[in-house]
Amino acid sequence: MPDAPFDVTETSTEVERPHAFSIGTAVPGARLFSALDGSLPAEAGWERREYRGVARCLLTTEAPGSRVRLRATGSAFSLIRPPEARAHGHQWRPATGTLACRVDGGRPRELPCEGGDEVLLVAGLPSGAHEIELEAGGAAPARWALEGIRAWPERPTAVGGRIEGGPLLADVRAEVAGPVSFSASLRDGHTGRFAFLVPAAGRYRLDFSAPGWDPASSAFDAPAGGSVELPAVTMREHSPAQAPARALAPDEPLVLVACAHCNIWGTEPAEWLARRVGWINAQRPHAMLLANEVNPGYVAGALRGLACPWVITDGNHRHPAFGQWPGEAHGQAQVGPARIVTAGLEVAGDSWRGVFGRFAPGDSLRVVCAYEPFAPPELLEEAGVRLYFYGHDLSRPPYWTRGRTVFLRKVDSQTFYRIEIGPPHDAAAPIKVRRLVFSRAE
């Protein structure tokens, strides 16, 4: 790291390897060929794109005619389609094209690319090796995407349904228990629909969970090689909770924990954040800062065990319904003489006056948690901000100063900072920073 205008300590990396808490588990009796492990062969024109912060991956292309060819053994094959990107906070364009599927060189069947589900491509084939070809159909401009193909020894049973949970609910963790058991990420965040396949007939139970929502369950009888549509399930979103700040003594530092751009867009990233809460509480922070986040509903669920108040800002990957979240209490925090205010994606120009106007005359230590570092310098100096933490824009080093203000930005989506400010608690307070990385990499 470059030289910093304050004391910085870097710690050893703590790693969850390899994706130890990934939702997706193997479906007994079926074989998955996926973009994640490279077992799905693609011709030139396809690009591998990883979901942010989870063990999932797409193949994408914008070139009509691009093909994926798989030769595998089975009597049935299914296609795993990605969810609608924008509802999950992903910045790339939606997959608007259709895929033409051919089996053993036969007539093509066309399917839309998106759906956030698993659909049966073909069944009833003679047992043995078959060639599955997927071609980006239609004309540009369009975008095509897929996650994987699954081979089945027999025709599986198709299970579909809908989960209602409000505009911020994206995906859910589904624990499938019955004649076979496995875990899966289900639900398209745009439509609320889900669809998956089970390889054996019998009685099943589904347990749905998502941080920030009450759990739900469903049960069904799967007919052999048939299909079943489940009644709609509703998951109730929790009301945002805010723990009180512990007192700040005059002779102790203000302790903050900060992270940014952690890509908390759905269940698995939120579960990863929830596993950090024990470490965060062990730091005894007075408050936590989260900048440039995606989905506040999942963040709130992950942080329900947090023992301090927290503030959050949106950013360039925000969920379309971020502004509908009723979390006004998480826009600022007061800890004795210190006040923390936030500035999100849409703050610019004169609207910065409203941000700094939230500081009261008695706030001797002033902190900003922001999307980007573009506050007007004259207003920043006038406000007497000591620490400015932000989660986007890499044009400057991670640590820099302007006037009396120290700027600290995120380094990556896995970095957490432990920050000590003061004493004294004023615009010249000394600052110490410790950096810890909780890696999600393989």
Image (cartoon, grey):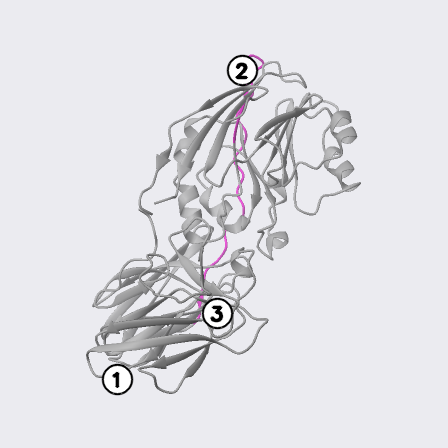
Local crowd at mark 1 within 10 Å, few (<14), some, or many (≥20)?
few
Q: Majority secondary structure of the magenta segment?
A: loop
The residue that mark 2 highlights is: 252
- Residue 256 covered by magenta stretch: yes
Amino acid type, label 2: Glu
**Does residue 328 appear left or right of residue 46 in this picture?**
right
C-alpha gap between disc 2 and disc 1: 71 Å
- Residue 251 covered by magenta stretch: yes
Where is 322 relative to 220, above or below?
above
Circle 2/circle 1 CB separation < 8 Å: no
Where is 264 relative to 332, above or below?
below
The residue that mark 3 highlights is: 114
The C terminus appears in which quarter of the rendering? top left
Where is 357 relative to 222, above or below?
above
The residue that mark 1 highlights is: 124
Amino acid type, label 3: Glu
Residue 3 percent across, percent down from the top left: 55, 22
**Does residue 68 appear left or right of residue 346 in this picture?**
left
Residue 101 percent across, percent down from the top left: 39, 79
Residue range (magenta) = 232-257
Of 48 and 288, the residue lying toward us = 48
Q: Determine if residue 198 is in view.
A: no
Q: Earlier in the sequence, mark 3 or mark 2?
A: 3
**Does residue 27 appear left or right of residue 215 in this picture?**
left
Local crowd at mark 2 within 10 Å, few (<14), some, or many (≥20)?
few
Q: Residue at 60% of width from left, 57% of height from top? A: 320
Amino acid type, label 1: Gly
Q: Earlier in the sequence, mark 3 or mark 1?
A: 3
Q: Earlier in the sequence, mark 2 or mark 1?
A: 1
